[in-house]
Image (cartoon, grey):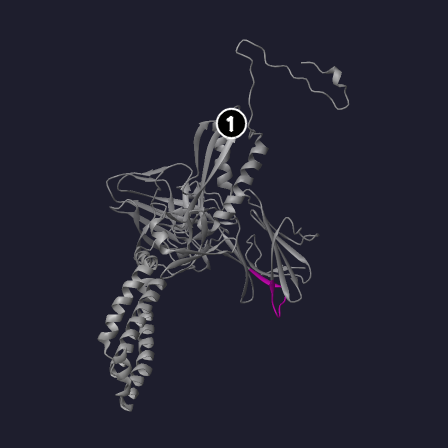
Amino acid sequence: MTARKDSNDRWWGDYQLPVSAWSGWQIGPLHLYAYCAAGEWLFRWRREPDPLTADLRFDSPSQEPEIGDHESARYALAHHSGELQLQPLLADLPVVARPASTLHIPSHQQTVLYVSTVLWLQARHGATRLIEMPVYRPSDTWFGADTIDGEFCYASRTQARTSLESLIHFPHRAITPIIIVNEVEDPLQILQLRVPLPYLALHVSPDGQLWTDSIELTRGADSAEAALELLGTDSLPAGCERLAAPREAAPRHSLVRSFSRLFD
Amino acid sequence: MRELINSFGTLDIGSWVRALLILFIGIPLVRLLSGALYRMIVGAMGEHGAVTLRRVVFYGLSIIIAMTALRELGFNLGVLLGAAGVLSVALGFASQTSASNLVSGIFLVAERPFSVGDVIRIGTTTGEVLSIDLLSVKLRTFDNLFVRVPNESLIKSEIVNLTRFPIRRLDLQIGIAYKEDIGRVRDLLIQVADRYPLCLDQPRPLIIFQEFGDSALNLQFSVWAKRENYLALRNAMPEEVKKAFDAAGIEIPFPHRSLYAGSVTDPFPVRLIENGASAGNQKT
C-alpha cells in the first residue's frame, strides 16, 4: 500500500502514500496524519505531553483522526500524486540549554558536552514545501543580560552529558557536541548555554542517530561572551551523512553571547 | 491699504508674469525639494520627524516664494510686516494652547517616548498610536475608538508604553487555603509555567509570598512572555493554574469569616434543615 525508499528505522525520506486514505506517523511525541485528496493535502497532528516519548511508528489508521483532538492544516495543489517527503530540520532559533545540574569547568580546562535538542519536521511534495513544525513545541525563552536587550530562543533542559556512552538516543532529537574551553583563571560555571542551531547542519550517523555540526566555545576575558567556532563534522561519529544544510550562514569566527545568566 | 491698492495701478505686465513664474515654478520646486529631503532623512529621523521637517521646510520656503512674488509685484512688504506684527500679537494670545501643543510636539519628537505603532496608556486610555502630529497624537483604542490627545497633556502626563520592550511580565494574584503546603503549591506553579510553551523559561517564573490574608495565603505568581503573546498568556495561565490546582486538590478559598463567642466558649452549633422538614423542628 505504501512504500518508502529508505528501508530502516529512519522516519525521514520519501513516501508514496495512497490517495484518499489516511497515513499516520508517530515520531516521538508527535502524531502526524496525512490525507492525499484531489487538489489538496490535509494534515492533522497532536503531541503527547511527555517530550521524551521515544516511539517510532508508521501506519495507516483505520479511522479518521478526530478534528477536536488534533490541529489541522490544508494545502491546495493543482497537480499532485501521493508522493510525500519528510525532512528533519534543526530549530529555527538558537536553543538555550540549561543543564539539570550546574556544571563547573576549572580554569584552563576544556570539556565536551553533548546537548540534545528537539527536531523540526518538514513535509514536502516534490519541490513544494507543505507543512513544517517542531516534533515537540519547546518553550520560548529570553537570552540576554537584562529584560531589555537580548534575543528570543527556545529552551531545552539537558543532562549535558560528557561521555558518548551515556547518551540516550531519541528519533526526534539531534545531539550537538560542544567543546567548551575555559582560558581564564576563574572557573566557568555553566548555568545555561546558548547553542546557535540555525548555523549548524544536520547529519545522520550510520546507526541512525541524528547529529549537528560540532562547535567550540572558548571563554576569554569577558565571562559572558565566547569565541564561537564551527567545527563541522569534527567530533562526530565516522561515516555521518549530511541531511540538512544550516538555515542561516554563519561567520567562521565570531564572538557570541553564550554564557549568560539573567539577573534574578 | 491705500498704498497697496495704488500699487496695482503702477504694475506692468512683465511684473505680473515674473511674479506668476516665481509662484508656478517656485512652489513645485519647493515641493520637490521637501520631498527629497524627506526621503533622505526618514531613515535617520523616523517617519514622524521626517514628516515634521518636510512640512516646516515646505511651508517656510513657500512663504519666502510668496513674499518674493509679492515684492516683484511692487508690494511694500514693510506695510505687510507691520500689519503682521499687530496680527501676530493678537494671534499669539488666541493660540497659546496651540503653540504649547506645537512646542510639546517638538519635544515629543526629540524625546521619542513612543513611536507610531506602539501601544500606550495615558491615564485610563489605552490604544495603538496611529500618528504623532504637530498638535496632537491620535490613538486607536482596542474597542476601535478614535482618541485625540493634545501634545501638551502628553508632555505633562505619565505615559506607559506597553510595547517598548520585547518581553512583559504577567502577575497573577493567587490565594490558597491556609491548610495548603506553600512549598508544594510553589512547585506546582513552576510546573504549570514550565509546561506552557508561551511562558518564557527565562526570566524564571517568580512566586512571591504577599501576606497572610483574611481568608487565604496570598501569593503572587509572575511569569514572562513575548509582548505579542501577553494576551494569550493572560487568558491561558489562570486556566492552567486552576486545572492544576483542581487535579492536585489544592483549594482556592472563598472569603469567609469564623465566628466565636469568646475563647472559652464552644462554637455556635448549626443544624442543617432538610427540604420539607417543619420549621418547628429547628433548634439552636
Horizontal relation, residue B114 to residue A60: left or right: left
The amino acid beneath tag 1 is: Ala
- Would you name the residue on which mark 1 appears? B216
Horizontal relation, residue A23 to residue B264: left or right: right
Query: What is the residue that sits farthest to the bottom in this orientation?
Result: B13
In the rendered image, residue A168, in percent from the top left (x then y), is placed at 48, 43
Figure check: B187 above or below B39: above
Q: Check the picture and name the quadrant holding the C terminus of chain B.
A: top right
In the rendered image, residue A220, in percent from the top left (x then y), is placed at 26, 47
| Magenta residue check for A235 | no
Residue B38: which quarter of the image? bottom left
Residue B47: which quarter of the image? bottom left
B238 or A26: which is nearer to us?
B238
Horizontal relation, residue B139 to residue B279: left or right: left
Residue A110 at least partly seen: yes
Q: Residue at x 40, y 59 (%)?
A: B116
Q: Residue at x 23, y 71 (%)?
A: B82
A96 or A7: which is nearer to us?
A96
Q: Residue at x 52, y 11 (%)?
A: B263
In the rendered image, residue B16, in percent from the top left (x then y), is placed at 30, 87
Which range is magenta? Answer: A75-85
Asked which secondary structure carries label 1, the reply is: loop
Horizontal relation, residue A1 to residue B257: left or right: right
Query: What is the residue that sits farthest to the left in this orientation?
Result: B78
In the rendered image, residue A219, in percent from the top left (x then y), is placed at 28, 46
Q: Residue at x 72, y 16 (%)?
A: B282
Figure check: B192 above or below B257: below
Residue A240 at least partly seen: no
| Magenta residue check for A79 | yes
